[in-house]
């Protein structure tokens, strides 16, 4: 992979993302004029150009759409960076945040908040409970893997599967005991979506996700050394155990915040790094920025799809990313078979 | 002269009364109960949106009552609410608080209907909605009929032997503090769900239901409801099922929390106590 081509890919993604985001803030159940949206955004940024839209359109743009699209980008970017990180740490191209029990833990937290009635009465209760559930699952994973397997990769993987299964069982038990009218809230959350997300979600979740991603990007060289293998990394002077734990903790933090903000959004952490690895290369310092942009682009487009494919029905974001991700993997599998 | 009035007010130590807030003129309803109330107490020109469920036969008690010019909402769509310039959005007790936060941030006022877990709660919610939309008199009129139906029913059911009725929906039942529990009790029956300690709409399971041995099983008219009962290996052996005492209640009556809840009570009472309560209210 030539450096020039890699730069072109990253530049292309970096240019495509704002264009797609602009289209995404203009489209929805109430279409806004693209030129007017651009003018309002430039005006709102204090650039002294452009102008305001009519009041109702301004409200739709600035209160509803813009934070939602920005959050979609941060969630997508965060999940993709987490996916790329975990694939390097586990040296497995199929690794994603599910291995850490993040999704299952977040689901358990969210369902508990609904079952206890907090989600219906308290602002931000659902995402905060989901985040707490995700972090609790990761802590349990860490404690168990230390106690049982000494924190090896193999032990972490198996413990992660067990913790996820336990959390999923707890979620099912709570769901069965939850009143029917509350179940719909849970199902929408489990299926993923950004409906009803505003600036406050972006401020809280975005800070955690962007902060975590920045630290992961800054740790890309550590990731590259780790991906050589434990013995090689140790030979190069890297404290393998603590470095791996640090990266996993950061990945869990970002994935937990993303899941808390948007529910379950599958395949982003798999598809974006997998699709970009052939063009951006496997080195973390190249792959992570490209994965962030690719993941952001994917989720912004998927969220746009949920809003324009069927304006009257809540299409789950997670279903749209799965509809894109699953065929992509099948095609990639066929392509790989053909090359053998 | 105005100065003199001001001096007089200050001298009396009283603040001037605030100007009364104008009633909302562009009302959007995001729950079916509100649709059913608003269509009775407001001129239709003041409604800018109702739920799409208001057109669903078998769900709504106001099918055909809202003209097509009024927008239909299948979900809480904030963008469309803003575009419609709604000056009051009526939401339910279960509307997501994060959505309500965004409603406020968008400058939209909302009224939340709550407390509808009893007949008294429904009554109060109707009055509160009437006040919120500036149509208190219309709401009081609705409530007066509601009270009259329930009073008539209570009179007819005085001293009646109350059968034990259990609501059943895919393993769930209505316990205490529920609208369906209130419906069962107002129709001259005892709510088995409450008797066996279920709180809210809760899971009861086939075995507990079997042991509870209700006199009557109450289900909604929805696809597969009766079939799942009569074909269930255990529930099909329930005494009530074997003896044909399964009441299928029109779903629009079973789930309503509006003034139609009184009609629902009347309907169920007429099935449980046909000797006391005729199907149609005289």
Image (cartoon, coloured by chain):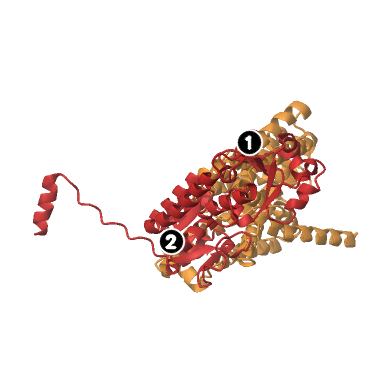
Chain colours: A orange, B red
> In terms of sequence position, does the residue under pointer 2 or pointer 1 come before the other?
2
Judge from the rendering whether residue B239 lies leftward or rightward of residue A310; answer left or right.
right
Q: Is residue B115 visible?
A: no
Q: Nearer the viewer, residue B14 or B216?
A: B216
Q: Callout 1: 10 Å neighbours few (<14), some, many (20+)?
A: some
> Residue drawn 42% across and 51% down?
B128
Q: Nearer the viewer, residue A147 or A213?
A: A147
Q: Position of residue A228 (x, y in %)?
A: 77, 43
Q: Give the quarter of the image for residue B105.
A: bottom left
Name, please, the residue furthest toward the top. Answer: A147
Task: Check the residue under mark 2 and report the chain it is in.
Answer: B
Give coordinates of residue B33: x percent, y percent. 52, 55
Percent coordinates x, y for residue A12 in the rendering: 64, 65
Identify the image quadrant of the C terminus of chain A. Answer: bottom right
Q: Which residue lies at the image location 45% right of the left edge and 68% below the top edge?
A: B44
Q: Which residue is mark 1?
A: B198
Mark 2 Cα within 10 Å, few/some/many (few <14, many 20+)?
Answer: many
Q: Is residue B66 above or below residue A319?
A: below
CA distance for labels 2 and 1: 36 Å
Mark carried by residue A9 = none
The disc placed on residue B41 is 2
Q: Secondary structure at mark 2?
A: helix
Residue B157: name its quadrant.
top right
In the shown orientation, is residue B213 left or right of residue A30?
A: right
Query: Is residue B22 something that shows in the picture?
Result: yes
């Amino acid at each position: 992979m030539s450096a020039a081509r890699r730069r072109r890919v990253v530049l292309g993604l970096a240019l495509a993302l704002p264009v797609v985001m602009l289209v995404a803030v203009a489209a929805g159940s109430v279409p806004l004029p693209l030129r007017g949206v651009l003018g309002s955004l430039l005006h709102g940024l204090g650039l002294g150009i452009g102008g305001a839209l009519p009041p109702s359109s301004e409200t739709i743009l600035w209160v509803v759409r813009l934070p939602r699209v920005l959050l979609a980008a941060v969630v997508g970017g965060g999940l993709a960076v987490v996916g790329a990180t975990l694939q390097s740490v586990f040296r497995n191209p199929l690794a994603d945040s599910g291995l850490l029990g993040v999704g299952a833990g977040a689901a358990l937290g969210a369902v508990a908040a609904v079952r206890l009635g907090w989600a219906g009465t308290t602002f931000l209760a659902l995402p905060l409970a989901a985040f707490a559930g995700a972090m609790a699952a990761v802590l349990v994973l860490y404690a168990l893997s230390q106690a049982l397997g000494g924190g090896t990769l193999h032990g972490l993987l198996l413990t992660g599967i067990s913790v996820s299964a336990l959390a999923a069982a707890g979620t099912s038990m709570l769901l069965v005991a939850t009143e029917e009218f509350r179940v719909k809230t849970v199902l929408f959350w489990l299926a993923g979506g950004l409906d009803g997300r505003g600036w406050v979600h972006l401020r809280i979740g975005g800070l955690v996700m962007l902060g975590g991603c920045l630290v992961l990007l800054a740790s890309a060289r550590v990731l590259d050394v780790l991906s050589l293998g434990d013995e090689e990394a140790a030979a190069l002077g890297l404290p393998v155990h603590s470095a791996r734990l640090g990266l996993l903790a950061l990945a869990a933090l970002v994935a937990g915040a993303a899941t808390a903000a948007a529910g379950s959004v599958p395949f982003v952490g798999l598809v974006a790094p997998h699709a970009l690895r052939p063009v951006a290369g496997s080195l973390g310092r190249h792959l992570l920025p490209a994965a962030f942009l690719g993941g952001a682009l994917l989720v912004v487009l998927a969220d746009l799809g949920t809003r324009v494919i069927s304006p009257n029905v809540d299409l789950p974001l997670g279903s749209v990313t799965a509809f894109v991700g699953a065929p992509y993997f099948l095609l990639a599998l066929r392509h790989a078979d053909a090359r053998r | 002269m105005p100065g003199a009035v001001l001096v007089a007010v200050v001298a009396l130590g009283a603040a001037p009364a605030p100007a009364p807030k104008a009633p909302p003129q562009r009302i959007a309803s995001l729950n079916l109960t509100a649709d059913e109330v608003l269509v009775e107490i407001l001129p239709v020109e003041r409604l800018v949106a109702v739920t799409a469920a208001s057109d669903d036969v078998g769900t709504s008690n106001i099918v055909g009552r809202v003209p097509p010019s009024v927008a239909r909402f299948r979900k809480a769509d904030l963008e469309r609410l803003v575009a419609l310039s709604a000056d009051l959005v009526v939401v339910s007790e279960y509307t997501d608080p994060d959505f309500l936060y965004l409603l406020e941030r968008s400058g939209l006022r909302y009224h939340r209907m709550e407390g509808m877990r009893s007949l008294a709660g429904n009554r109060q919610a109707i009055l509160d909605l009437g006040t919120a939309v500036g149509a208190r008199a219309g709401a009081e009129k609705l409530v007066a009929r509601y009270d009259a139906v329930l009073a008539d029913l209570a009179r007819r059911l005085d001293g009646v032997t109350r059968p034990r009725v259990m609501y059943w929906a895919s393993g769930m039942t209505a316990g205490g503090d529920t609208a369906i529990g209130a419906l069962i009790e107002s129709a001259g029956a005892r709510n088995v769900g409450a008797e066996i300690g279920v709180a809210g709409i809760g899971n009861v399971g086939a075995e507990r239901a079997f042991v509870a041995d209700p006199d009557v099983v109450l289900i909604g008219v929805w696809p597969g409801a009766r079939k799942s009962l009569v074909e269930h290996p255990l529930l099909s052996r329930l005494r009530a099922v074997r003896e044909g005492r399964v009441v299928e209640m029109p779903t629009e009556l079973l789930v309503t929390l509006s003034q139609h809840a009184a009609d629902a009570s009347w309907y169920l009472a007429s099935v449980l106590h046909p000797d006391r309560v005729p199907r149609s209210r005289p």
